[in-house]
Amino acid sequence: AGLLRGKRGLIFGIANNRSIAWGIARAAHAHGAELGFTYQGDVLKKRVEPLAKELGARLIGHCDVTEPATIDAVFAEAAAVFGSIDFVVHAVAFSDKDQLDGRYVDTTEDNFAKTMLISCYSFTAIAQRAEKLMTNGGSLLTLTYYGAEKWMPHYNVMGVAKAGLEASVRYLAADLGEKNIRVNAVSAGPIKTLAASGIGDFRYILRWNEYNSPLKRTVTIDEVGDTAVYLLSDMARGVTGEIHHVDAGYHVVG
Ligand code: 0WD
């Protein structure tokens, strides 16, 4: 343990102790990272504050990615607290629940735009701010899902947004490589979280992955966290533009 000793990072997207971002935060903390957390709104603040305290987070800021001023405020605070930063984890996504069921073709323009803004563009918005604070290079990490690559039942507009997110990983990697800022994604297998509970037939998807993945099981937030630590650390210093599956191998069979 200690792969992130001396590194400072921001983690966006902790909603509660089942969040993938929480698995990543715990693993990063265990490896010596100094952390800053964000929460989306007052409802989540109550859940995120004790978690931030548990890991000795040095910053806890309000950030709703649909309000750019709140993204600016978090990075201004990070500049004040940390000076420079070494990594950012983006684990943020949203789509209206009633469109994570039924057919993709019925997506409304309004929800399409909202889903794209929160689940795809926000990573680029965060990268713009992070670039300025990553004066010694850095690592940006986002979370994606296999539904970006292949049709998956009920994933619908979120699959389209994740496809855009995965393309942004490649474009951001090319743009920021000069500054030794690496940009990668973890493509996680299905995990029961707050966001996942909005997806139709999610339990069926979990079962399907247990039966069909090479490891014959699903993955945990701790397993995603350990892989994230590798991608955030200097162990992965030669890795950028990568979509790394942590899905018990499901992508080779599905
Ligand atoms: O099976 C899964 N759970 C998978 C999730 C498989 C593969 C990928 N992912 C992705 C998700 O799409 C997301 O990008 O992992 C990321 C984290 O999701 P999660 O851990 O599954 O879900 P959750 O714990 O709900 O965290 C997502 C959070 C939001 O939670 P809620 O449930 O309240 O929407 O994203 C944040 C919020 O904290 N979020 C926002 N943050 C800032 N501004 C916003 C926003 N506008 N909207 C949502």
Image: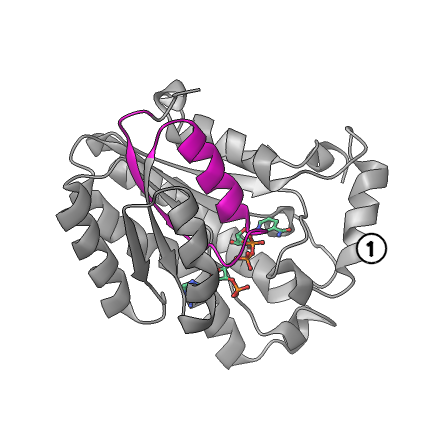
Residue 163 x/y as whole percent:
53, 52
Say which of 170 and 28 sits in front.
Answer: 28
Disc 1 on helix, strand or loop?
helix
> What span is colored magenta in the figure?
5-33
Q: x and y percent of residue 124 in the render?
A: 33, 53
Q: Type of residue at label 1?
A: Tyr
The residue carrying pointer 1 sits among few (fewer than 14), some (14 to 19) or many (20 or more) residues within 10 Å by Cα, namely few
The percent coordinates of residue 165 (x first, y second) are 46, 52
- Above or below residue 100? Residue 245 is above
Q: Which residue is mark 1?
A: 204
Q: Is residue 239 visible?
A: yes
Dividing the picture into quarters, in which one does residue 40 lie? bottom left
From the viewer's perspective, is 204 left or right of 15? right
* Vertical comparison of 46 with 19: above or below: below
Is 243 or 233 nearer to us in this picture? 233
Name the quadrant of the N terminus: top left
Residue at point 44%, 41% (across, down): 25
Q: Quadrant of residue 136?
A: top left
Q: Is residue 3 left or right of residue 199?
A: left
Up/down of 90 relative to 1, above or below: below
Direction right: furthest residue: 211
